[in-house]
Image (cartoon, helix red, strand yellow):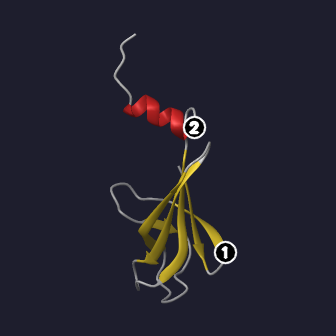
Amino acid sequence: MKITIGVEGKTYQATRPEQSGHVEAAMKCLFCGAEPLRAKGVGSNIVKGRDYYLNDNAVTLCCNKPIDFIKSEFDTIFGLEEDEQVLNGPWRVY
C-alpha cells in the first residue's frame, strides 16, 4: 500500500504504524510544529478503477487542523471488480 498526504498543495510520503488509526510523515506540522506530522482521515471517498484508492479528508492529530488529503493506494491482483468478485463470491474448492 502506498500512502500520500497533501498539505498546503504539496504531497508527502507517509506510513501507517501498525495497529494505529493514523498515518505519519517525516515532517513538522505546519500549524504547531509537532514532529512527525500525524494525521487521520475524517471522510472517505473510494475511487474505483483498475487502480483503486481511498481518498480521505484529513486532520492533524496534534492540533486538529485540516490538511488537504490522505490518499491510500491499494494493490490489486486483477483490478477492483475482479478482486471483489473473488473475495465476495461463492467459495470454491478446486
Give the image location of residue 13, x and y in percent: 59, 63
Instruction: Give SS at disc 1.
Output: strand
Badge 1 crowding class, 10 Å Cα cut-off, few under 14, some 14 to 19, many 20 or more, is few
Residue 9 falls left or right of residue 16 = right
- Comparing 65 with 17, the one in front is 65
Give the image location of residue 33, x and y in percent: 50, 87
- Comparing 20 with 64, the one in front is 64
Residue located at (62% from left, 42% from top) = 50
Residue 76's label in the rendered image is none
Residue located at (45% from left, 36% from top) = 84
Task: Name the amino acid, label 1.
Answer: Lys
Query: In which quadrant is the C terminus drawn?
Result: top left
What residue is pinned by disc 2?
79
Q: Is residue 65 above or below residue 77?
A: below
Q: Is residue 49 above or below residue 18?
A: above
Give the total number of marks visible in the rendering.
2
Residue 10's label in the rendered image is 1
Residue 93 falls left or right of residue 56 = left
- Comparing 38 with 7, the one in front is 7
- Comparing 76 with 88, the one in front is 88
Quote the CA–CA distance across marks 1 and 2: 28 Å
Instruction: Give SS at disc 2.
Output: loop
Task: Name the amino acid, label 2.
Answer: Gly
- Specify which label sits upstream in the sequence, 1 or 2: 1
